[in-house]
Image (cartoon, rainbow, N blue to C red):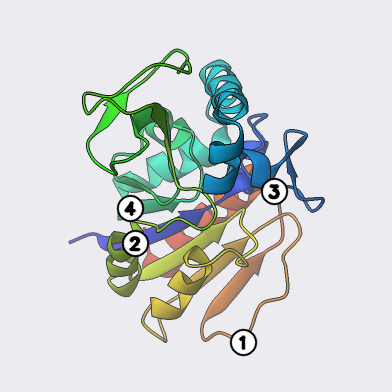
Amino acid sequence: MKKKLAVLTGAGISAESGLKTFRDGDGLWEGYDVTEVASPEGWKRNPALVLDFYNMRRKQTVEASPNKAHTGLAELEKYFNVEIITQNIDDLHERAGSTKVAHLHGEIFKMRSEKLLIPSYEIKGDIQLGDTAPDGNQLRPDIVWFGEAVPMIEKAAEIAMDADVFVVVGTSLVVYPAAGLVDMVPLYNPKFVIDKKVPYLKPMHNLTVIEKPATEGIKELTVQLKKMFGL
């Protein structure tokens, strides 16, 4: 039986593929105020702006390629039962070969009615103002905005609670509810935090910090895990 390896990923893993998938310290996302493009209020004020913003993110994602951190996690499936929980809306984990990926904040290649959470529909091109779902309402990106519920958080919590090893890559552990997942991991199970600039971390049992960019950090993680489990 393979050990269960749960991995929580954030913007830092996709940054090396050229994607900014979350806000920088100045509160901007690709130069936009996040409250204008990632909130229900922003959507009500200017849906055309929001649609244009995500249409551009979709184009950027199509042009981006998985990096060695994404492929490194996919390769770990040879040795572990890997489940990825990502805060990112891109599909780089899937394109790298990871087979179990839970998207906490939605997916850029999915859309839904502005009134209904389900069902969602595949979208590769643009969503335009006036494009409607079968229920007659405007289509919007199937993205979890600030102030909205996170439907996948229960599944993510189950993955964390069941993890033999828990890894955090490229996220500052300040955005909740995702940041609370590390607290759900069994107390003495190994935990790793990988970031090029590791933020302040509260004390944790059996914690290893790897202060490197995601691509280098996943390479080192692989070495340490193989040594830890005699692989």
Q: Is residue 85 above or below residue 181?
A: above
Amino acid bearing label 1: Pro
Taking the image as drawn, is residue 39 in sight? no
Disc 1 + disc 2, Cβ < 8 Å: no
Taking the image as drawn, is residue 142 in sight? yes
Mark closest to the chain's N terminus, 1 or 2: 2
Secondary element at image label 2: helix
Secondary element at image label 4: strand
Residue nearest the observer in this picture, 15 or 116: 116
Q: Residues within 10 Å of mark 1 (few under 14, many from 20)?
A: few
Q: What is the C-alpha distance between the residues marked 3 and 2?
A: 24 Å
Residue 146 coordinates in the image, percent (x, y):
55, 54
Q: Residues within 10 Å of mark 3 (few under 14, many from 20)?
A: some
Mark closest to the chain's N terminus, 3 or 2: 2
Q: Residue at x 64, y 69 (%)?
A: 209
Q: Which residue is mark 1?
A: 203
Amino acid bearing label 2: Ala
Left or right of 35 in this view: 48: left
Q: Which residue is mark 3?
A: 213
Q: What is the C-alpha distance between the residues marked 1 and 2?
A: 22 Å
Amino acid bearing label 3: Pro
Residue nearest the observer in this picture, 50 or 169: 50
Residue 7 coordinates in the image, percent (x, y):
44, 57
**Looking at the image, which residue sits at the far right?**
26
Mark closest to the chain's N terminus, 1 or 3: 1
Secondary element at image label 1: loop
Disc 4 + disc 2, Cβ < 8 Å: no
Quarter of the image containing the N terminus? bottom left
Q: Residue at x 38, y 64 (%)?
A: 230
- Please identify, in this view, whether the residue under mark 1 or under mark 3 is nearer the observer: 1
Q: Which residue is mark 2?
A: 156
Q: Which residue is mark 4?
A: 82
